[in-house]
Image: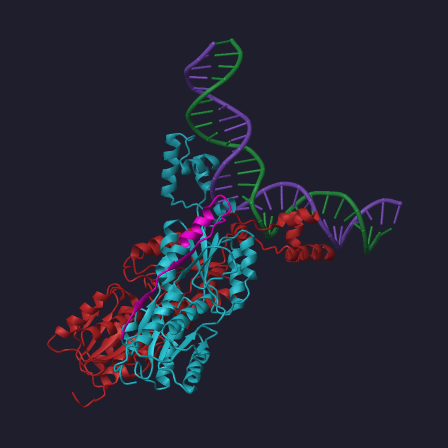
Chain colours: A cyan, B red, C green, D purple
Amino acid sequence: MKFEPVTIKDIGKALGLSTSTVSRALRGSYEISAETKKLVLEYAEKINYRPNPIALSLKERRNHSLGIIVCEIANNFFSQAINGIESIAYNRGYHVIISQSHESYERESVILDHLASRSVDGLLISVSSETKDYEHFRQLYEKGLPIVFFDRIVNEINTHKVIADNFKGAFDATEHLIKNGCKKIAHITSAPYLSISVERLEGYKEALRKNGLEYDEKMVHYSYHGGMIYDEVEEALRKAFKQKQKPDGLFAAGDRITTACLQALKKLDKKIPDDIAVIGFTNTNMGEVFNPPLSVVRQPAFEIGQVATELLISMIESKRPVTEFESKTLQTELIIRESSVKVNNAKK
Amino acid sequence: MKFEPVTIKDIGKALGLSTSTVSRALRGSYEISAETKKLVLEYAEKINYRPNPIALSLKERRNHSLGIIVCEIANNFFSQAINGIESIAYNRGYHVIISQSHESYERESVILDHLASRSVDGLLISVSSETKDYEHFRQLYEKGLPIVFFDRIVNEINTHKVIADNFKGAFDATEHLIKNGCKKIAHITSAPYLSISVERLEGYKEALRKNGLEYDEKMVHYSYHGGMIYDEVEEALRKAFKQKQKPDGLFAAGDRITTACLQALKKLDKKIPDDIAVIGFTNTNMGEVFNPPLSVVRQPAFEIGQVATELLISMIESKRPVTEFESKTLQTELIIRESSVKVNNAKK
DNA sequence: AACGTTATCGGGAACGTTTGCGTAAAAATA
DNA sequence: TATTTTTACGCAAACGTTCCCGATAACGTT
C-alpha cells in the first residue's frame, strides 16, 4: 500500500508558483506579498498539507526525536520516568523513541546502534544490568551524540546524570527496619557493578554501622538480571535463610526484585512482617493492596525523567560544545505500611 | 552539539570513486569489480560507515517504522503486547514508536497527526476510552496509511483486527463466580462505547442468563477513564453496595480497574472473598502476592501484539491494495486463586 | 534620462542515497 | 585487424525541503 502525501511542489503547480515561493509563503517570509501568502496558506489548508519531516531532517540534519533506552517498560519506575520524559519532550517539539534492552548487553548494543543510525538527536539512557563495558556509549558520545544518563548511570563518561538519592533512600529504609527491631537484615539488589547497586549498598552499610549492627556480606545477594529471572531471587532468599543467624528483615532493591521477593517469601512460607520485615525500593502504586501492604522507598521517577530530558535538550540545542556537566540527585520518599512494622516488637 | 556521521560521499572522496560506485559496491552489485568492492567494504568497515536511514526514507518513501498508540504503557496488558509487537517488528527490520493517549481523545488525535506526519509506515492502535468518533482514523486510513486495531478495536473501519476472546473470557469469569455461590455479581468496566466493554458485558450477561440469574443494570458500572481515575471506581463500588441486594461477587474488567477495585474494597472494609468474591480481567503477573491472591482472566497479550504486527507488516508490504481483512480472536485463560473462592460456600 | 531601491518572485544547489543511462577501456569475436 | 560484446565505472536525476543568489518590474532619486 502506498500513502501519498501532498508536497510543496503540488501546491506550486496548482497555484503556478515556484517551490521556493511556496516554501517562503508557508514560513511567512517578509519577501512574499500578502496576497500570495494568503493564497498559498489557504490552499495548503484546504488540501491539508503537512511538511515532510523526513525531508526536513535530511536538510537540517536534525530529527527532533529523542531515543530512550531502558531495561523494561513494564516496570513502574521506568514507565513513570518515561511519562516524565514525554511531558517535557512533546512540549519542546521532540518525539520520543522508546527501546528496551531487557537487561541484555547485546540487545543494548544493537539498539544503540540502531538508534544512532536512525539519527536521534540525543539519547536518554539507563544501562542494562549486564553492562560492564561502556565503550559503545563512549564511541557515540565522543562523536558528538548528546547523551544523558539517568537512574543507572555510568560514572566513567563525563556528561549530565540524573539519579534518585539512592544512598539516602537505602539508608532510611535500612534504619527504619532497625528501629523496628530487625537485627539481621538481608539485602537483595541488582548486579553489583550497577551504579544504583553500589549506592544503595553503601546506604545500607552506613545504616548498619551507625546503629551498631555488623555488616555481613552473606546477607547481600545480587540478582544479576534485576529480578527478571525469578529463580535468581528465590535462590538468594533460600541462601539467606540457610545462614546460622536467619534474617528478620529484608531490604529489596528495585521494582522487579521487590515483587519477586514477595512471591518467593510466600512460597517459602515466611510470614511478613513477623518472620521477616520487608521494605522495597519500588515505585509500584499498588503497595497497599499487597499482602501485607508494602512499605517502600519511592523514587521521584516522573521528575527524574523530566530533569534528564531538560538537560538533554539543552545539550542538543546548545550552540557551543557543552563542557560543564551536572549530576542531579533527587530525593526519595519513605512510605511506611505494614510489611515493615513488626506486630510485636518486644517478641524478639 | 553536532553529530557528523560519515557519508557515502566521504568514502568516495577518500577512495577516488564516485558515489554511485560506492553505493553499488556496498550493495554488492554485480557490475562492480571484486577488488573495488573489497576496497570499499573494508574502508566502510574501518570508518564504521552506517547508511543514513533518513535519506533512504526520503528516497523510498518508506520509513521502516511502526507507530503504536495505546492508552498507557504502565499497564501490564499493553506492556506485554508491546513486547510482542517489538519481537516481530525488529525481526522484520522495523522500528517501533510508542505513544500514549492517556485515555484522552484529544491527545490521541494529536499523536495520530504527529505519527502520520512523521511518516510511519503503519499504525497499531488500541483506542482511548474517550474515543467515540473515528473520523481521525478513517481519514488517514482512506489516504492509504495501513492501520491494524488490537484489543480496543473500531468495528466501523474495515481493516485487520486482533482481540482476545472477551466474550468467552467474561462468560467464564462470571460463571466461575456463580459456581462459587455468588448470587449477585457486580461488573465494573470501561467506557460503554469501547469494543472490549460491550463484548465483556455480553459475556457477563450470557453467563447470568444461562445460570438463571437475573441481569440487573444497577450492578453494571462504567469507569469512563478505564480505572485511571480512582474515585470513579470507588464511587461505582459504593453505589453497588447501596442497592437493596448487595453484591457478593465482582467481575472487574481491565488492569487498572481491577487494582483500583482492590484498593477501594479495602477502603470500604469489604472482605475478599467472603463479603465479595473478586475476579479481574487483568494481565498482572503479581496476582498471587495480592491480598488475597487474585483470580484473573488472562489475555494472551504478547501473542495479540505479535499477530497484529504480522498483519500490519503484510499490509504494508503488499504490492496491491488489501481488500480481504481478518479479525483474529485469541483465547483467554482463567486462573483461579483465592479471591474468587468463598471459604464457606454453604454459609449463604 | 539614467540610475539606485525596493518588493516579489524563480532558479538551482544542497542534504545522502539509489538507479537508469551513458561510456571508456578491456576482452572477445569475427 | 576491425568489430562487437562485456566489464566497470561515472553522470545526473530524483525524493521534499530550505535558502542563497539572481532576476524582473515598478518605483523613486538625482
**Is residue B25 or residue A289 the one in the foreground?**
A289
Is the residue B180 above or below the residue B310 in the image? below
* Residue A189 in view: yes
Quarter of the image where one finds residue B299: bottom left
Count of marks, rendered view: 0
Quarter of the image where one finds residue A289: bottom left
* Residue B139 in view: no
What quarter of the picture does the C terminus of chain A occupy? bottom left
What residue do we see at 54% from left, 64% from top?
A: A109
Q: Is residue A343 magenta?
A: no
What residue do we see at 61% from left, 55% from top?
A: B49
**Is residue A290 or residue A252 the one in the foreground?**
A252
Q: Find the residue positioned furthest to the left.
A: B244
**Is residue A228 or residue A177 the one in the foreground?**
A177
Q: Which residues are magenta?
A: A309-337
What residue do we see at 45% from left, 80% from top?
A: A218
Q: Find the residue positioned furthest to the bottom.
A: B346
Could you say where residue B29 lies in the image, as x and y percent from the top left? 66, 56
Could you say where residue A97 lies in the image, as x and y percent from the top left? 44, 58
Q: Is residue A319 magenta?
A: yes
Could you say where residue B318 lies in the image, as x and y percent from the top left? 49, 61
Could you say where residue B201 lies in the image, as x and y percent from the top left? 25, 72
Q: Is residue A197 left or right of residue A276?
A: right
Q: Is residue B101 left or right of residue C15?
A: left
